[in-house]
Image (cartoon, rainbow, N blue to C red):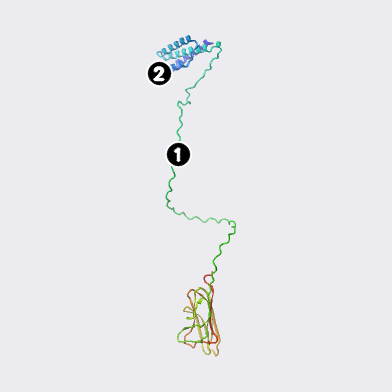
Amino acid sequence: MGSSRQGLVLGCCVLLAIAWGPVLSLVPRGQQDELEWEEKEALPSPPDHEKRERKAKGSQALVHSSSRELPTQRVYNFAMVYLLRDEETQEKYSPSQGKDLPTSRCYRCCEPSTPVYQTIPAPQINITILKGEKGDRGDRGLQGKYGKTGSTGARGHIGPKGQKGSMGAPGDRCKSHYAAFSVGRKKPLHSSDYFQPVVFDTQFVNLYKHFSMFTGKFFCYVPGIYFFSLNVHTWNQKETYLHIMKNQEEVVILYAQVSDRSIMQSQSLMLELQEQDEVWVRLFKGERENAIFSDEFDTYITFSGYLVKPASEP
């Protein structure tokens, strides 16, 4: 069993010598010596001291001779060293000693996928450390151009009815505006060569003194719509000819023809006045015999007016 195994190993070594001879010739001298010494140190020494020395000397001689021989002869010498070590292993672990042969291990040290050098991971940088502080706010940019006006969208749905609001604060007190007057004359008046205003000597109502008893004119302080009324008594055999004036404009006339008897004659109207307008009564000049009658016992001539609606009201 042992001889057949040795023959098989020897045959394999011859084949390896033929195949690997040219390759080993290219290995430098220093690397060959290192490989030879590593193999010698790796092999265990047999228990017998004499056999160990003898076989070590033989293997040493083979190793030193291999440095001077051809590559084929070097392989052959390595094979012989292997056979000598195999013998020593069989003697050390023989069955007679009650020990089992050690289990051989195979190491694949030249696999292409195995990296020769340890891969060093690339360094990673923490970006949060490099982040700087927040800068100051920049200036506001220029306003851009206005875009085109879009088309009117469709009307939305009617929303739900809101809740009733709270009561508001009370408003200002309502301000009422008033203006009214009523005056009379107890003296008769005859016409002259020029127009003359009718001046009144009796005051019935003169609210806020808007009517001047000295000039006989009503002065408008509150703009709005006013109502005016004029009443006179005619004179026998004389004509009655008066006008109600607005500023210097003749508005309406009060007229009565010549008659054998005297009668009461009246005129009324409504005027829209602005502030500082004046309303008064004027007797026509003396081209005609013109007069109005009155006495100290009774008042035959009256002129009245009041504010109907101020212009400030809606």
Residue type, label 2: Gly
- Quarter of the picture containing the N terminus is top right
Q: How many marks?
A: 2
Estimate the spatial distance between the alpha carbons at disc 1 and disc 2, rounded to whole Å: 52 Å
Badge 2 marks a residue whose secondary structure is helix
Badge 1 marks a residue whose secondary structure is helix
Quadrant of residue 96 within the rendered picture: top right
Q: Is residue 49 visible?
A: yes
Q: Is residue 7 visible?
A: no
Task: Give the residue number, with chain letter if any, for mark 1.
Answer: 129
- Horizontal and vertical percent position of residue 275: 48, 73
In the rendered image, the vertical position of residue 145 relative to residue 203, given as above or below: above
Q: Residues within 10 Å of mark 1 (few under 14, many from 20)?
A: few
Quadrant of residue 166 within the rendered picture: bottom right
Residue 23: assigned label: none
Badge 1 or badge 2: first in the primary sequence:
2
Residue 30: assigned label: 2
- Quarter of the picture containing the C terminus is bottom right
- Horizontal and vertical percent position of residue 260: 55, 90
- Horizontal and vertical percent position of residue 105: 51, 19
Q: Nearer the viewer, mark 1 or mark 2?
A: 1
- Horizontal and vertical percent position of residue 160: 59, 56
In the rendered image, the vertical position of residue 49 relative to residue 148, given as above or below: above
